[in-house]
Amino acid sequence: MQNYNDKTTIQTIADVFIIIGLAILGMIAGSFVGMFIGIVGFDIPFSNYQATIVNPQTANEVMALKWYNFFSNLGAWVLSVWVYFKIRFYSFGKQINFNSAQPKIIYAHLIPLFFALTITSAWLLQINQQIALPEWIEKLSSKQNKHLLTKMLQMNTHTDYLINLFFVALTPAILEEIFFRGTLQKLFIEGFKNTHIGIFVTSFIFAGIHLNVQQFIPMLFLALVFGYICHYSKSIWPSIILHFFNNGLAVTAYYLKGGNDIANELVNDNFSPSIPFFLLCFFSIVVYFIYLHKQYTSLKHE
């Protein structure tokens, strides 16, 4: 069976374009499925479907939006990868690295790592927001996406919270990691013949597709952490778990924002840890990945 290491740089570049094209087609196919679910399952009139999804007003319409996003993301990030692997005769499970992380102690590190990551990202966000950007770059941010996310994150009950943990936290973490860290990152590493360049390019694209220049720097940093821990652990699970923690924190902050000061600060993007605390967390992350690199190197040479 063929694998990534058998290919030339030209083949890898061609595969990058193929997987991106498949992602676009998959998103279109998934969107049609989501639209069908909205019309049939939520009684949204076909003639009014687009206007409803762009600006949902009722709980029923917001739920239809969540299913629409789920299927469009499923098509873009997973169906595209599945078709690509079928075309190339690759094994989906082996190429995505659904195996357990090595060493397994990495799983015990994820909670303290996420804590340090949250503090570091919050401080980087403050830096990002103070950078004066040209107007044309500011326009790249999607206010519509932020509006829809706010609609989706409106919660009144515990059930609403659990539903959002599934639609906003868990499924994006799994689907996006399969595409970006499980597939695209490997292609770029092989194409550039350099692990660090491959991870950076993948992370840059990941941060860019979220269309939020006000959060680009912390999102890029998060993506780099996801990329390196996936690479060094030889498994996609640690990056999925960290990604879920990050999304879940946002969902939880929105749920608690009415009666919790820290949650309010997180929701309003003004949570600002002290510089010494930021430096401690940042350098802890750096030291941790130096440790992982040494572990990865030693395991590779065994």
Image (cartoon, rainbow, N blue to C red):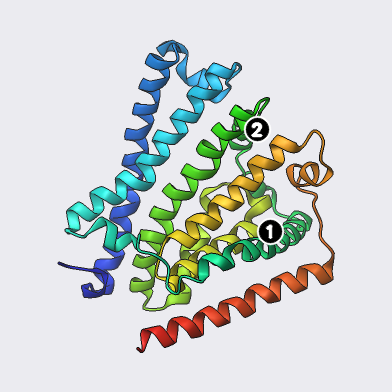
Q: Please state the horizontal and vertical placement of residue 21, each as a whole percent of the image.
A: 32, 48
Residue found at x 50% / y 85%: 294
Q: Nearer the viewer, mark 1 or mark 2?
A: 1
Mark 1 belongs to which amino acid? Answer: Thr
Measured from the top left, where is residue 160 in percent x and y? 60, 28
Numbered mark located on residue 118 in the image:
1
Is residue 209 found left or right of 12 in the rendered image? right
Residue at 66 percent across and 28 percent down: it is 155
Mark 1: few/some/many CA within 10 Å (<14, 14-19, 20+): many
Q: Secondary structure at mark 2?
A: helix
In the image, residue 256 sits, relative to residue 231, either above or below, namely above
Figure quadrant of residue 91: bottom left
Question: What residue is at 45 percent from the left and 66 percent from the top?
Answer: 230
Q: Position of residue 172 (x, y in %)?
A: 48, 45
Q: Which mark is residue 150?
A: 2
- Taking the spot 74% from the left edge, 37% from the top edge, the residue there is 256
Q: Nearer the viewer, residue 145 or 295?
A: 295
Q: Which part of the image, by quadrant, shows the C terminus?
A: bottom left
